[in-house]
Image (cartoon, rainbow, N blue to C red):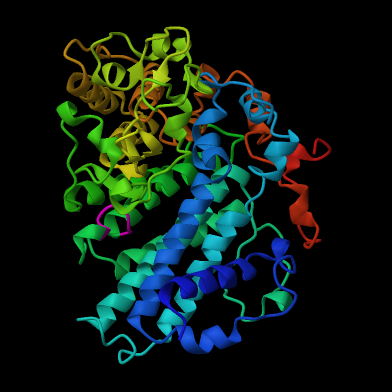
Amino acid sequence: MKNIITKIGVLIAMATAVTVSSCKKLLYEEPKDAPYEQTFWQSSRDVRSAIAGNYAMMRSAITSKNNRYFMYGDAIAKNYFTIQYTGDGLEGIQGGDFTFQYNINTLANYTLYYKSIAMSNLILKKVNGMSDAQLSAEDDPAQFRNSVIGQAYFLRALSYFMMVRVWGDVPLVTESYEDPINAPQLPRSSRSEIMKLIENDCHKAINLLSWNYANTGDAKVTANKGSVYALLAHLYLWRATMSDVSVDAPNLTDVNNADTTINTLISKGGYALTDTANYKNTFIGRSSEGIFEINISENTLEGSSSSIGSYFLNENYIRGYGNNPRFYTTPLYLNNHFETTTDIRYKKGFDLTNPEKPMSVKYSNVTYRNPGQKLDPYLSNNIIIFRLGDMKLLKAEIALYKKDAATAIGIINDFRKRNDPNPVLIPAGSSVDQVMDEYAYERGKEMYLEGHLFYDLLRTRRYGLIVDWLTESRFRREGFYWPLDPALFRNNTLLKQTPYWLGKV
């Protein structure tokens, strides 16, 4: 019997081989997993290893390629922060050109997401078929099975949600193929099909998961009902506003669904906003506000030496980093978003030692594995995917879609009063359009560098406030979606390039 570490490696290899056909035949010349199939799925210990591998794959997909989660969600909205040139062309994405070779071969390739999806599909297939006797080490085998299956549905839904916002139409893979060599080639499915699967997976997960955690060590960094409700709320708002970008009016059915979903999350989840005195603790992780996070904690020796936060930090924060970080916050962002310097998000979120190149210090919880000599530094800041502040602000967006400016004003002003002893409030009687502008700026303050900002601007149609390369014409032509890496076409003749990028890649 292989040990657990070896089994995890086998599972990762299996999941890699079961990815969408765009990368089939690249990894195995013949199926080699049959012996492991017979020996692995025999106990709850095996299942725990598999679901841990599923989370590891999701983390890999999110953190690869310069922390791609933040590149898609924040960096391409260039007026939030600047990427300085170092020769790899990464800064090109900030001008709306996604065709630099480095970016095409990395950020335009979705393979890592499909590895996570393949693992989810494998878990759904195998754990459903395991008997209570095989899971007898658990106090409640049925509950354990439900929890694992629910988490797999959530992780599959989250992977697809991340991809549908980046590429729109993507291949839809819901089966686990025993023989990856003979897995079918698949074309891109419509975003409506992808979003329907996400919705269905979320509903299945909700029925299988609980609000609480059997093990407190799993809190926030594994999925529960709250995690799924948060994903579902974002899905509904994305679908309400981005299914048809030829129009600006949202689909109110999905808007109302988002409203109901967030109400349930807030009333039943037991979450609480972090006290502003402990502002930065939210971004260390596992705070009362956290709903779902990717574990990047040195408490479990899973800190990061290449976190998004480290790109902003200099020698004052990490020994050996010099005085010129590659990323810096634009002074324009600070000037446009913060009416005062007393806002806690301004005071504790940024270092203005160099006023021309301010540093974001939202993620600056540095731990040295050799503390005596300050060597081997790692950032110990979880990646916050969903949190309560996000959900509460989305309620203002929902109100604005319903033409209820007064409710939105109240929500936004509450955020300003909570975070600033000298708040500049939105006056009563402001129009929906005026309040939507204020909402976009408030999201920019509250959700800075959390992977949401570009998507917020697309949903609300406020991209013109921040993203100068995204004209209305390009937006209507869906020029915010990414192209596909040409390497993906080599073994899948059914794939087609993203329409906006035809002839450009």
Q: Which residues are magenta?
A: 218-223
Please report the residue visible at 27 percent of the width from the left and 82 percent of the height from the top.
142
In the rendered image, residue 321, in percent from the top left (x then y), is placed at 46, 25
Q: Is residue 378 left or right of residue 187?
A: left
Q: Residue furthest front?
A: 373
Residue 167 visible in the displayed image: yes
Left or right position of 503 against 54: right
Give 470 or 363, whichever is nearer the viewer: 363
* Residue 394, image x, y percentages: 34, 36
Which quadrant of the figure has residue 474?
top right
Left or right of 91? Residue 249 is left
Q: Is residue 433 visible?
A: no
Query: Which quarter shows the N terminus?
Result: bottom left
Number of numbered labels in the structure image: 0
Q: Quadrant of residue 104?
A: top right
The correct choice, above or below, for 285 with respect to 27 in the image is: above
Outermost residue, right side: 503
Quarter holding residue 77: top right
Residue 142 in the figure: left or right of residue 3: left
- Residue 55 drawn above or below residue 302: below
Residue 360 % position (x, y): 39, 23
Residue 219 lies in the magenta-colored region? yes
Above or below: residue 208 compared with residue 104: below
Q: Residue at x 35, y 16 (%)?
A: 351
Q: Residue furthest bottom?
A: 133
Please identify the dominant SS of the magenta region: loop
Tell me the quarter of the image containing the C terminus.
top right
Residue under the image location 34 percent in, 89 percent down: 134
Picture coordinates of residue 379, whole percent (x, y): 37, 38
